[in-house]
Image (cartoon, rainbow, N blue to C red):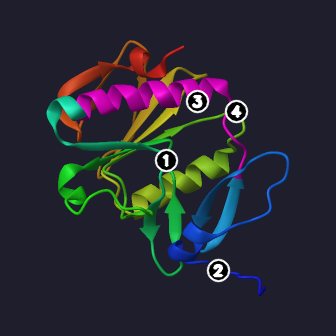
């Protein structure tokens, strides 16, 4: 079998590899597969908590769907597929139903949860890809530092602490949540 040096999002969706003892998460970055260590327990708990809170708010507002670790095609030629820890997509973008494969285009809200295994470069690269894809809002959650950094397109990032509240734009514009509730424990 020939070795593919650059994959498309469609090839990546069907890509199979031999796995070692640790099941690695993968993303496609400019046509190349990038492996990441599976997240730890604190990360997983934060992911479930944030996903549940956002799903509840989206259902109440009737604005869209929340996904976890779902691939989003952020760029083409070469293709980049990022899988944010939690993501929100407006209902208007899902009129044809939820796709079997990756979602074309960026999420309307991407949530990345910093893990101890995340190098600074990996996080910065992911944030740069979301910006390049014109993702409207990105949250960077740091459970250890107890902060949530909000990146809103066209604005300077805002760092929020446990005592602050964050707006749920774009999924429930009238709602706000305390950051401490999103950070969990």
As drawn, the label of residue 44 is 3
Answer with the quarter of the image where residue 14 lies. bottom right
Magenta region, residue range? 36-58
- Ranked by sequence position, the earlier of labels 4 and 2 is 2
User: Which residue is under mark 4?
Assistant: 116
**155 left or right of 5?**
left
CB-based contact (under 8 Å), mark 1 and mark 4: no
User: Which residue is under mark 2?
Assistant: 6
**View extreme (right): residue:** 21
- Ranked by sequence position, the earlier of labels 2 and 1 is 2
Q: Nearer the viewer, residue 163 or 181?
A: 181
Element type at mark 2: loop
User: How far apart, in angstroms, are the residues tagged by discs 1 and 3?
Assistant: 13 Å
**48 left or right of 20?**
left
Q: Give the quarter of the figure containing the N terminus.
A: bottom right
Q: Position of residue 62 (x, y in %)?
A: 16, 38
Element type at mark 4: loop
């Amino acid at each position: 079998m020939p070795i593919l040096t650059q994959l498309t999002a469609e090839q990546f969706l069907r890509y199979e590899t031999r796995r070692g003892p640790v099941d690695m998460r993968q993303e496609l970055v400019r046509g190349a597969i990038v492996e990441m260590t599976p997240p730890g327990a604190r990360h997983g708990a934060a992911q479930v908590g944030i996903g549940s809170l956002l799903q509840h708010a989206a259902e109440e507002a009737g604005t869209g769907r929340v996904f976890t670790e779902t691939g989003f095609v952020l760029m083409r030629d070469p293709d980049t597929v990022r899988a944010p820890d939690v993501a929100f997509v407006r209902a208007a973008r899902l009129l044809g139903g939820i796709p079997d494969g990756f979602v074309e285009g960026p999420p309307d809200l991407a949530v990345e949860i910093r893990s101890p295994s995340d190098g600074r470069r990996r996080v910065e690269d992911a944030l740069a890809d979301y910006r390049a894809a014109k993702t409207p809002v990105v949250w960077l959650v740091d459970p250890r530092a107890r902060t949530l950094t909000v990146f809103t397109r066209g604005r300077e990032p805002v760092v929020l602490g446990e005592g602050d509240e964050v707006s749920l734009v774009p999924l429930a514009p009238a709602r706000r949540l305390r950051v401490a509730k999103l950070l969990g424990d």
